[in-house]
């Protein structure tokens, strides 16, 4: 899979994704630092790359339509989170992408499809992603 990392993610994140066998480009590498969110989004569409960002603006599906892209992953970290937590989140995201076998998401019905063409609800795939990305709490 092809990814583009926003400028709020550093070289460690890029290395982790590359080590997982994916193609990764970064905003600083492409001299796009400081560019508008809209321009970055269009760049991802043109290059067929999934954007990974810490910028919550990219979670606005009315502004950044997911069906136009190879994907958008907005990682949410608690304030003051360690680089170790970010690494764990990225590993969880990569593991989910490798195990989910989601091939397409159609709009407006918003139903994801398995690689073999079977449809499943977007909520179920989001739930699976959440299982991998949310920290485990022993008091649940």
Image (cartoon, rainbow, N blue to C red):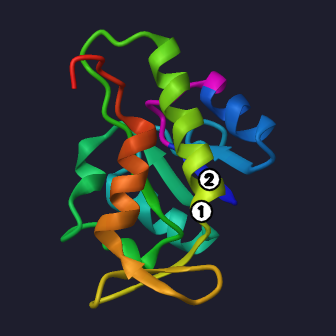
As drawn, 134 above or below 129: above
Q: Is residue 34 above or below residue 96?
A: above
* Kind of element beneath mark 2: strand
Q: Is residue 127 visible?
A: yes
Q: Which residues are magenta?
A: 6-12
Q: Is residue 72 above or below residue 7?
A: below
Left or right: 34 in relation to 116: left
Give the residue number, with chain letter if any, for mark 1: 49
In the figure, is residue 59 to the left or right of 83?
A: left
Callout 1 crowding tier (Cα within 10 Å): few <14, some 14–19, many ≥20: many
The answer to which of marks 1 and 2 sits earlier in the sequence is 2
Q: Judge the density around disc 2: few (<14), some (14-19), many (≥20) Cα neighbours within 10 Å.
A: many
Image quadrant holding the C terminus, namely: top left
Q: Which of the pair 39/9 is nearer the observer?
A: 9
Q: Which mark is residue 119?
A: none
8 with respect to 13 (left or right): left
Residue 118 in picture, x, y percent from top left:
53, 87
Q: Is residue 128 magenta?
A: no
CA–CA distance in space, label 1 to label 2: 5 Å
| Residue 11 inside the magenta-drawn segment | yes
Q: Which residue is mark 2?
A: 3
Residue 121, quarter of the rendered image: bottom left
Do labels 1 and 2 touch, CB within 8 Å?
yes
């Amino acid at each position: 899979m092809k990814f583009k990392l926003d400028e709020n993610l550093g070289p460690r994140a890029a290395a982790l994704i590359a080590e997982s066998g994916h193609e990764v480009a970064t905003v600083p590498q492409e001299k796009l630092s400081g560019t508008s969110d809209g321009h970055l989004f269009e760049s991802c569409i043109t290059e067929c790359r999934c954007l990974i960002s810490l910028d919550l603006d990219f979670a606005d599906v009315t502004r950044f339509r997911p069906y136009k892209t190879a994907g958008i992953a907005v990682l949410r970290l608690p304030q003051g989170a360690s680089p170790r937590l970010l690494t764990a989140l990225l590993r969880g995201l990569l593991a989910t992408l490798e195990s989910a076998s989601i091939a397409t998401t159609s709009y407006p019905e918003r139903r994801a499809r398995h690689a073999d063409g079977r449809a499943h609800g977007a909520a179920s795939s989001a739930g699976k992603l959440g299982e991998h990305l949310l920290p485990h709490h022993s008091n649940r």
